[in-house]
Image: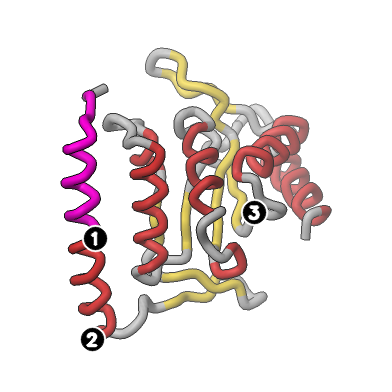
Amino acid sequence: MPQYRDKDWEKVSSWCQEQNREERAELKKMGEVPRAKLGSQGFEVSKLGFGCMGLTGIYNDPVPEEVGISIIKHAFDQGITFFDTSDAYGPHTNELLVGKALKHLPREKIQLATKFGIVRFDNSKVIICGTPEAVRSCCEASLKRLDVEYIDLYYQHRVDTSVPIEDTVSSAAAFLFLFS
């Protein structure tokens, strides 16, 4: 992981603030980020979502926590309200980061998605689990890491072919119904 100096982050922070001013002015000219309805019950998200995976590294080095939080806040300030994470990213550190960022934002205006099903990466193989017990355990852990009372969109990251999909989905639905 590269070592960052305070001066480097001062430059990045200054650049982000300038970009933010310019982008806000541009957005005022263009209008707001369009929204889309998902499903039939009126759930609405910004058409432009923010996938948070890269903030904690998967294909890149992770950014420092304060930078990750400021990036998420910046995205929200630009009209993005749909944020996607997963318990597999980090693992777990991405949900922790997103949860910290949410403390700076109005939760009622955020649509939060997270995923379950990937247990770990073992060499070049992805270990998955979609048992009802795992779904419940993963959801409880995600709620705790995100430090939220509810998750807007919870879905399976990878399908566990050793478990009937009806068992996995009905377990997720039953558990999430308890929190709705």
At horizontal 44% and vertical 77% (from top left) the residue drawn is 35
Q: Secondary structure at mark 1?
A: helix
- Work out which quarter of the rendered image holds the C terminus and state it: bottom right
At horizontal 60% and vertical 72% (from top left) the residue drawn is 43
Q: CA distance from mark 3 to mark 2?
A: 33 Å
Q: Which residue is mark 2?
A: 29
Q: Which residue is mark 1?
A: 17
First in residue order: circle 1 vs circle 3: 1
Instruction: Based on the picture, tell me whether residue 134 belongs to the magenta stretch.
Output: no
Please, what is the three-letter code of the amino acid marked with disc 1? Answer: Gln
Q: CA distance from mark 1 to mark 2?
A: 19 Å
Q: Which residue is mark 3?
A: 151
Mark whose residue sits in front, 1 or 3: 1
Depicted 144 relative to depicted 41: above or below = above
- Work out which quarter of the rendered image holds the N terminus and state it: top left
Q: Which residues are magenta?
A: 3-16
Depicted 26 relative to depicted 142: above or below = below
Q: Secondary structure at mark 3?
A: loop
Around disc 1, counting alpha carbons within 10 Å, would you say few (fewer than 14), some (14 to 19), or many (20 or more)?
few
Q: Nearer the viewer, residue 143 or 7?
A: 7
Determine the image quadrant of residue 14.
bottom left
At horizontal 39% and vertical 78% (from top left) the residue drawn is 34
